[in-house]
Amino acid sequence: MSRTTLEKVCIFVDVQNVYYTCRQAYRANFDYNKFWAKATAKRDVVSAVAYATEPEDKNQKQFQNILRAIGFTVLLKPVLKRADGSTKADWDVGIALDVYEAAPGCDTVILVSGDGDFTILLKRIRKRFKTRTVVYGVPKLTANPLIMEASQFNPIDSNLLLN
């Protein structure tokens, strides 16, 4: 009896990017359960990381616990408040380093973000490690170079939103 080897995937979610792009484009929230079912079907999940900010209220804590229950490791970063009152909680460098380090150990990297800053990362892991890349993003708010560099682009649309 032959045994089929499952595709090994590593999943990386830029929670802030997904939240704001879904809210802006659809006035709706991303459905992490639907995404998980689609992204992990007939695949071996090597790692799944959601990058978020330190919770400021009980709803954020509850949401992050839901992510953990689904199967994500949730990494948190404090929100930095600038002197001018603006805030920043950018995970781009952390995500990029984690993706680069994980790429040799998986067949496919799944990145949930529309941030064009990740374009060079996808190009590098494809060339260096021959790792396939799948990007999930809101089509009109995902950088075109990121879409073009991905091995596959999956649009976040009504099929991946909470009803």
Image: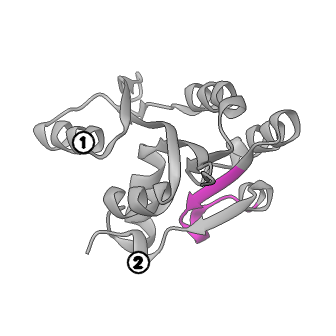
Counting from the top left corner in percent of width and height, residue 15 is at 42, 45
Please tell me which residue is depicted at 53% across the width and 52% down the height of the picture. 43
Spot the residue most to the front: 1
Please tell me which residue is depicted at 58% across the width and 44% down the height of the picture. 9
Q: For label 2, count other residues whose C-alpha is less than 10 Å away and answer few (under 14), some (14-19) or many (20+).
A: few
- Count the numbered circles shown: 2
Considering the image in quadrants, where does the N terminus appear?
Answer: bottom right
Q: Which residue is mark 2?
A: 158
Q: Which residue is mark 1?
A: 69
Provide the residue span drawn in magenta. 133-144
In depth, the one of 108 and 19 nearer the eye is: 108
Q: For label 1, count other residues whose C-alpha is less than 10 Å away and answer few (under 14), some (14-19) or many (20+).
A: few
Please tell me which residue is depicted at 52% across the width and 45% down the height of the picture. 44
> In terms of secondary structure, where does tag 1 sit?
helix
Q: CA distance from mark 1 to mark 2?
A: 23 Å
Residue 137 included in the magenta stretch of the image = yes
Which dot, 1 or 2, sits closer to the camera?
1
